[in-house]
Image (cartoon, grey):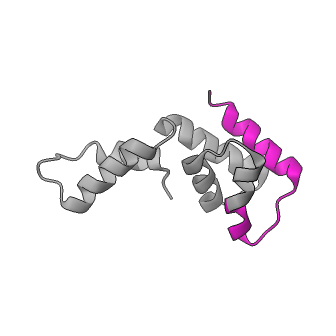
Amino acid sequence: MLTLSEAHQILEKLDVEKADQIQKRTLDYTSKFAKATPEIARKLKKQLETECGLSEGEATEVVNIMPKSIEELRTFTAGWRKLLPTETLEKILKILKSKD
């Protein structure tokens, strides 16, 4: 699983003139919505997995979205079919804020 930042880094290596329409659109999307450098995204993802017990997919989703509040975080963690304690949510936000 790749974060948007990691996907963008890979797509940047493509020759845009030879890229197909999907690659071009994906490159455009990742350039607009990636919220961290690939190095920081990898670090945050690993930290969320080890310190907060998130799966790789969950950690990737969190890094891609970079929520700013517990309410925002709860909005999409509700779809994970597991309830995260408030302490875990606070820890996630603290980790994400450490990127700044």
Q: Is residue 16 left or right of residue 65?
A: left
- Residue 51 shows in this picture: no
Where residue 22 appears, as percent x and y from the top left, is: 26, 61
What is the chief secondary structure element of the magenta stretch?
helix
As drawn, the residue found furthest toward the bottom would be 81
- Against 83, residue 39 (above or below) is above
* Residue for point 77% across, 48% down: 70
Where residue 11 appears, as percent x and y from the top left, is: 30, 48
Q: Is residue 52 left or right of residue 99?
A: right
- Against 90, residue 22 (above or below) is below
Q: Nearer the viewer, residue 80 or 73?
A: 73
Where residue 54 appears, as percent x and y from the top left, is: 72, 57
* Residue for point 51% across, 59% down: 1
Where residue 45 appears, as percent x and y from the top left, is: 62, 47
* Residue for point 20% across, 60% down: 21
**Residue 82's image quarter?**
bottom right
Question: Which region shows up in magenta?
Answer: 76-100
Residue 95 within the magenta-colored segment of the rendering: yes
**Residue 99's image quarter?**
top right
Placement of the C terminus among the 4 image quadrants: top right
* Residue for point 76% across, 36% down: 94
Label count reads: 0
- Residue 59 shows in this picture: yes
Q: Is residue 26 left or right of residue 74?
A: left
Residue 92 within the magenta-colored segment of the rendering: yes
As drawn, the residue found furthest toward the left would be 17
Q: Is residue 32 left or right of residue 45?
A: left
As drawn, the residue found furthest toward the front would be 71
